[in-house]
Amino acid sequence: MKKRLVFAAAAAMLMSAGAAQAAAGNAAAGQAASAACAACHGADGNSMAPTFPRLAGQVPEYIQKQLHNFKTHDRNDPDAGIMFGMAAPLDEAAIANLAAYFASQAPTKNPMPADAALVAKGKNIYNGGVAERNIPACAACHGPAGKGLAPLFPRLAGQHGMYVTNQLKYFKAGQRANDPAMMMRGVAKNMTDEEMQAVAAYLQSL
């Protein structure tokens, strides 16, 4: 319990520190600029491809941070290359507008099936963590319903299980290193592949 409270306090400090970093965007302008994103993420951000993240309803500050990190190559995981070229020409206004547009879209239920046994196991980990191996509850930062907590922690509800699993593996391997204060690397390093898949299956089912 003490470690969980410390983790939650650290998360709150990071959220406070990052609150002023994002600019407000114009969703209508973002929609006009989003055509290039549609092939992978869907016109409304509800991607149907399991390797491309769903952006509908995403925390706008999180989208802005990721686009900035792709632009500077601070996010350099094995799947990031395609985003380098997409983010390169974006200025601050375009980044803010795209974030505002996708954040304003209604997330749809993920239609892909998830293994029921994995979903049940993942629900327990998401809500309670694994105390004996210092894995905190995911809900502490991402919210009890997986809807994220602005400005730093993304929406995960309905996200593709394959995408979530891959990102957790990248954090564990240090291949993705743009997480504030190394929080996700610290969490993922203690997770087994099965635990990652279980949490991902649960999130996909939300």
Image (tube, rainbow, N blue to C red):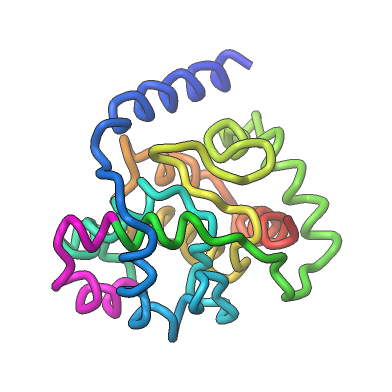
> Quadrant where the C terminus lies?
bottom right
Residue 83 in the magenta stretch? The answer is yes
Residue drawn 56% across and 63% down?
Answer: 165
Q: For the view shown, which residue lies furthest in the front direction? A: 28
From the viewer's perspective, tell me whether residue 196 is left or right of residue 118: left
Residue 86 in the magenta stretch? The answer is yes
Residue drawn 70% across and 57% down?
Answer: 198
Q: Main SS type for the magenta part?
A: helix
Q: Give whichever of 197, 151 is nearer the camera.
A: 151
Magenta-colored span: 79-96
Q: For the view shown, which residue lies furthest in the right direction? A: 116
Q: Residue 3 at what x, y percent from top left?
A: 54, 19
* Residue 29 in which image quadrant: bottom left
Residue drawn 68% across and 42% down?
Answer: 145
> Quadrant where the N terminus lies?
top right
Q: For the view shown, which residue lies furthest in the bottom direction? A: 39
Above or below: residue 98 compared with residue 22:
below
* Residue 114 in which image quadrant: bottom right
Residue drawn 44% across and 86% down?
Answer: 39
Q: Residue 57 at what x, y percent from top left?
A: 54, 55
Above or below: residue 22 compared with residue 163:
above
Q: Residue 157 at what x, y percent from top left?
A: 63, 54
Q: Residue 147 at what x, y percent from top left?
A: 59, 45
Q: Give whichever of 135, 69 is nearer the camera.
A: 69
Above or below: residue 16 compared with residue 179:
above
From the viewer's perspective, tell me whether residue 115 is left or right of residue 52: right
Q: Give whichever of 23, 180 is nearer the camera.
A: 23
